[in-house]
Image (cartoon, rainbow, N blue to C red):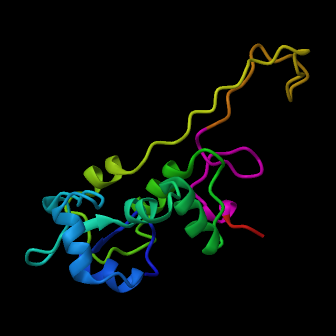
Amino acid sequence: MGRPSWHVATTMEIAQATGIAFGRLSNWIVRGQFPQAAPRDQFQVCGNKRVFRIDSVIEWLDGTAPAEQARHYLSGMGLAPPEGRIWTFVRHLERLGIFPHRWPPTSIVQYLGSLGDDEVVVREPWSGPTPIGPGGGTASSHALPSLIATDPRGAPTDDLSLFIMQ
């Protein structure tokens, strides 16, 4: 389809992309054997079209998790989201309007909230020797990884080029 996996597509677009007959898809939808359609009022859709999250359809077809689909799509675009923070990265890209929507959301805030949650990585606290800080002193506690992108000097940045694969 050429769209990010976290966007939506209509039944006809899904039928054309997958090669599944439109009538068969419609029967699966009516019987409840297909992923649930996104609420119609959340997207600017003409007429009585139903839209589905593309990642939910792919997960239904082959079992690939939505976060893995997003990572695959972004790596194909030359972007490398931070490990375990795929949805934070996607939300950042959506706020910047990097990927235009075929069927735009009516509320970007509500749409961003509907995206997945990042993995929570729990690590044991550091039990080795206390590292020496940059000023020559010792660090008082183990620093948690920052959720903000930083440049090589450690300053916060919104520069997406830091995530581009070389």
Q: Position of residue 109 (x, y in %)?
A: 28, 51
Main SS, magenta region, reads loop
Q: Note whether 86 is above or below 62 in the view shown.
A: above
Residue 45 on the magenta segment = no
Left or right, residue 1 beside residue 112: right
Assign the N terminus to one quadrant of the image. Answer: bottom left
Left or right, residue 165 beside residue 17: right
Q: Position of residue 115 (x, y in %)?
A: 38, 51
Residue 153 on the magenta segment = yes
At a point 63% along the width and 32% down the height, the residue shown is 121
Q: Position of residue 97 (x, y in %)?
A: 40, 68
At a point 57% along the width and 46% down the height, the residue shown is 85
Q: Note whether 117 is above or below 55 in the view shown.
A: above
Q: Nearer the viewer, residue 63 or 98?
A: 63
Q: Which residues are magenta?
A: 147-163
At a point 86% along the width and 29% down the height, the residue shown is 134
